[in-house]
Amino acid sequence: MQVFIVDDDPFVLRLLSHQLGELGHTRVRAFGQPHELLLALDAREDWPELIFLDLQMPEMDGVELVRNLACIGFTGSVILVSGTEERILRTAQNVAAARGLNLLPPLSKPVHLEQLREVLDSAKGQDTGGGDDDPRISPQAEALWQAVYEDELVLHFQPKVRMDTGALVGAEALVRWDHPCHGLLMPDRFLDLMEAHGLMDELTMRVLRGALATCRGWLEQGLDLHMAVNISATNLHVLGLPDVVQHTAREAGVPINCLCLELTERMLARDRLLSLDILTRLRLKGASLSIDDFGTGHSSLAQLLQAPFDELKLDRSFVHGATRDPARLAIAEASLRMARKLGMQTTAEGIERAEDWQLLRDMGCDRAQGHFIAPAMPADAFPAWMEDWDRRREALTGAHPEPG
C-alpha cells in the first residue's frame, strides 16, 4: 500500500514513517508542507491508498487541505492526525466526511504504535462494496432500471440480538446491487440515484417482498424472528403505503407484527402531516416503527414526541468509541434513558468490538447490531452463523443456548 504523510513537524514525519515501517508499510512518502503533497497528487503519479494528514499546519491547515483533496476527487483513505482537543478533531472529521472523503478513525498525537496498528487493521476490514473499478461510478438510468427489473438486487441480512441473553431476535434486510461489471455495490453507491430516477417505490417493494419471503422461511424453520426493512422519504408520500404493506405481508404468509419498518428522522421533515398519517396507520395495522440513526438529525426530540415509533436505534457514531469519548458516552446514556422513559425498545448500531458490547449492555440497551455480532450476510449463511454465535454468546452473557 502506498502511503503519504503530511506534517510540518520533521520529528513526527520520521516517527510515523518508522512506525509504519515496523508494521510492514515500506512505500511511504513524507511531505513537510501541504502544497508539496498537492503537487505530487496533481502529477497523478501513483496516487496513494492512504494519506496521514496533520490538522495544525501554519501555511495551510488540515481543514483547508481536506477541501483541496475533495476538490481533486481523491479516492483513497484519509487519517486525520492532531494534538488538538478531541472536540475540534471530531468536528474536523465530520467536515471531511461531509466532503465525501473516505475516512479512517483519527489519531491523537503522540501516535502510539498499537493505536496505529488498530487503525490500519480497521482499514483492512472496511467493506467497500466490491469491484476493483473506480468507486465513483455513476450508473445511467438504463442500468438502474435493469438493476430493479432484472433481479440484479440482492438482500443481505444483519442479525439483531438481545443484549441481556444474546438471543437472536431478528434481522435487518440490507439491499445490495450485484452489478455485472462492478461487483457487489453497497447502498450508498446507488440509492440516491434510484431516488433521483423515480425508482425508490419499486425498489422498496422488491426489498419488502424479498425480506418477507426470507422471514417466512425462518418461521417455517421454527425461528420466530422479526424482519426490519428500511423505507425512504419517497415512500412516505404514498397514502396507500399501509394497505400495500399489509397486503404484501398477508400475501407472504407473515404476520405483520413480525415486520419493523426503519426510517431516519430526516424523512419526516418534507411533509410532516402526510408522514404522520402514514406512520400512524402502519402502527394501527400492527407493524413496528423504528427511528434509525437517532441523534444525527436536527429535530430528534420533536420526532419522538409526534411520531408513533416503538424502537430507537442509537446511531453508530455515538456507540463505537464511546468507551474512550466522554461526549459520545453522554449522548448514548441520555438517549437510552429517554427511550426507556418513553417505553421504547432500544437498539445500538455499530457494535464493533467487545468493549462496545460490554458498555452498551451495562447501560441497559435492549438490543445490539454490528460487526462484533455479525456483518450482513446472505440468508443461507444464517444457520452456520447461529451455531457460532451460540458458542460465543454464552461467554459474553452467561446465558445458555436454547435447546433446538
Image (tube, rainbow, N blue to C red):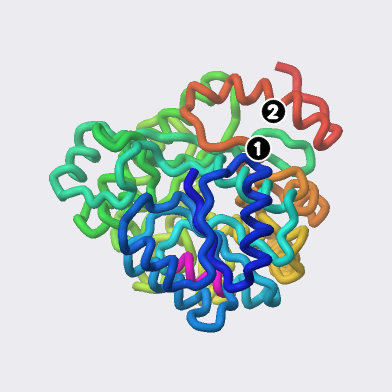
Magenta span of residues: 91-98
Image-based side of 265 in relation to 113, left or right: left
Of 236 and 135, nearer the camera is 135
Image-based side of 303 in relation to 343, left or right: left
Q: Give the residue type at disc 1.
A: Ile
> Image height check: is 383 above or below 143?
above
At x 72%, y 71%, the residue is: 327
Q: Is residue 283 visible?
A: no
Q: Is residue 230 visible?
A: yes
Coordinates of residue 382 in the picture (x, y in percent):
56, 25
Q: Give the residue type at disc 2.
A: Trp
Coordinates of residue 224 in the picture (x, y in percent):
60, 30
Q: CA distance from mark 2 to mark 1?
A: 8 Å
Coordinates of residue 391 in the picture (x, y in percent):
75, 24
Of 188 and 237, nearer the camera is 188
Which residue is situated farthest in the top direction here? 404
Which residue is situated farthest in the right direction here? 398
Give the label on residue 389, or none.
2
> Image height check: is 156 above or below 400?
below
Whether 217 is among the magenta residues is no
Image-based side of 239 in relation to 106, left or right: left
Coordinates of residue 283 in the picture (x, y in percent):
49, 55
Residue indicated by mark 1 = 373
Quadrant where the image shows the C terminus: top right
Whether 94 is among the magenta residues is yes
Quick one: SS at disc 1?
A: loop
At x 16%, y 49%, the residue is: 140
Q: Are marks 2 and 1 in contact (CB under 8 Å)?
A: yes
Quick one: SS at disc 2?
A: helix
Specify the principal SS of the magenta part.
Answer: helix
Of 168 and 62, nearer the camera is 62
